[in-house]
Amino acid sequence: MLRIPRRMPEMPAVPVMPATLVIAAALFFAVGCTDGTQQETDAVHSPATAPATALDVSLIAAYADSVCTYCTQWNVPQEPFLLHGSTYYVGTRGLSAILVTSDDGHILIDAALPNSAPLILDNIRALGFEPADVALILNSHAHFDHAGGIAAVAAATGARVAATSWSAEALERGNTDEADPQYPEHLDFPAVADVERFTAGDTLRVGSLALASHATAGHTPGGTSWSWESCDNVGCVEIVYADSQTPVSADGFKYIDSSSYPNGIRDFESGLATLEALRCDILVSTHPEASGLWERHAARDSDRDGFVEAGACAAYAAAGRERLARRIAQEMGGDNQ
Ligand SMILES: [Zn+2]
C-alpha cells in the first residue's frame, strides 16, 4: 500500500519546480537547443546493440497524481548530456541521476521515481552505453523520489546496489523507518534486493572509477553525498553529487527534541561542514534546480566549462545551514513547520 503524504516531502517554501521553470522546460523542448548536437559530440561510444531488457511493470508503476502532486513534473523526460569527462546526467528534468562511465563498467547514482527507470535506461542507451554495463548503483538517500527507480534499474542491468547501513535497510524495505524525520508520510517504493553495505567515508570502485562517499545526513539518517575526479583531454575537475540538505519532517517531529533521530541536527551540521570543505568544481544536487543545474546547462552552450562554478558546494551548504537555523528557530518557537 502506498502511504499518502499530507504534503510533498521536500517542498521548500517555494515550489520545487515553479511555473516559470515548467514554462522554460516547455520552451526548451518547443524551440529545441543544441543538446542533441552536444550529445552526439559528447558520446563517442558505439551505439548500444543489446536488445532492451523487458522491465518488470510492477517495479515501474507511476504514483497517482493524488498521492504525488509533483511526480509528473519531476518525471518530465530530459535528454542526457555530458557533465565532464566520462560523467553524464541521465536523470529526468526534475530528479537527478548521474552515470559515471569507464571501460570496465559504469556507476549510476540515484534512479529517481519508479517510472523514471525506463527514461534513465533510455538515456543510457541514447549516450551509446549498454545498460548491462552498469555495474554498481549508489544512492543519495532512500526516499521514493531518488531511490524509487533503483529496483527496476538493478533488475534491468544486473548491477550491484550499495548503501550505508541505514539506507540499505530502507532500500530493502522499500521505505524508511521512524528515524526518518518524514516518517510515516513518505511513499513506499519498490524494494531492492541484496543491498551491499559500506561505511560513509569509504571509496566505492568499479574498474578505474573511484567515488568517495561522504556522510551528509539530517534529511535522512543515511544521507550520502559523492565526489570523484573527472578528467578529459584538457584537465581534471572534482565533481560533487550532493544529497538534499532540507530539514523537512512529518507533523509533530522536532529536530531539537527527537527520540527517534536524536542526532539529526548534529548530522546536518557535520554534513554541511563536509560539503563546505570538499574540493568542488562541478556540483549537481539531487533536485537539479537546487544547485542551478539548468542555468549552467544553458551556459555550457557557449562555454565548455559552463558547469564549473567556484564555491558551488560552499554556497549549497550555506543555503542548507540557513534552512536549518530557520527550522530550529521555528521549533524553539513552538512551530515545527
Ligand atoms: Zn528526500
Image: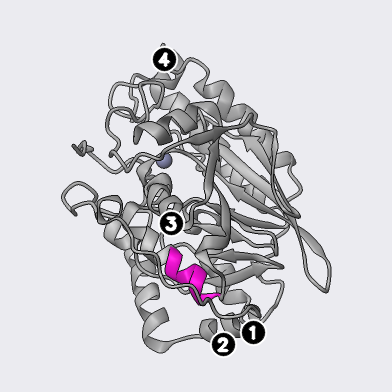
Furthest toward the front, the residue is: 50
Residue pictured at 43% horizontal, 55% vertical: 153
Query: Is residue 131 highlighted in magenta?
Result: no
Residue pictured at 38% horizontal, 52% vertical: 152
Place of residue 93 in the rendered image (x, y in percent of width and height, measured from the top left): 42, 65
Label 3 sits on residue: 95
Place of residue 144 in the rendered image (x, y in percent of width and height, measured from the top left): 36, 44
Tag 3–tag 2 contact (CB < 8 Å): no
Q: CA distance from mark 3 to mark 4?
A: 29 Å
Residue pictured at 50% horizontal, 23% vertical: 264
Q: CA distance from mark 3 to mark 1?
A: 24 Å
Tag 2: residue type? Thr
Q: Residues within 10 Å of mark 2 (few under 14, many from 20)?
A: few
Q: Nearer the viewer, residue 64 or 7?
A: 64
Give the foreground label among 2 and 4. 2
Question: What segment carries the magenta color?
Answer: 121-127
Q: Look at the image and name its color scheme.
A: one colour
Quadrant field for ligand 1: top left
Q: CA distance from mark 2 to mark 4?
A: 51 Å
User: Does mark 3's beta carbon lie closer than 8 Å to ligand 1?
Assistant: no
Considering only vertical position in the picture, is 239 above or below 1? Answer: below
Tag 4: residue type? Ser
Label 1 sits on residue: 41
Label 4 sits on residue: 258
Label 2 sits on residue: 37
Place of residue 262 in the rendered image (x, y in percent of width and height, measured from the top left): 48, 15
Which secondary structure, mark 3?
loop
> First in sequence: mark 3 or mark 1?
1
Q: Is residue 248 visible?
A: no
Tag 1: residue type? Thr
Tag 3–tag 4 contact (CB < 8 Å): no
Which secondary structure, mark 1?
helix
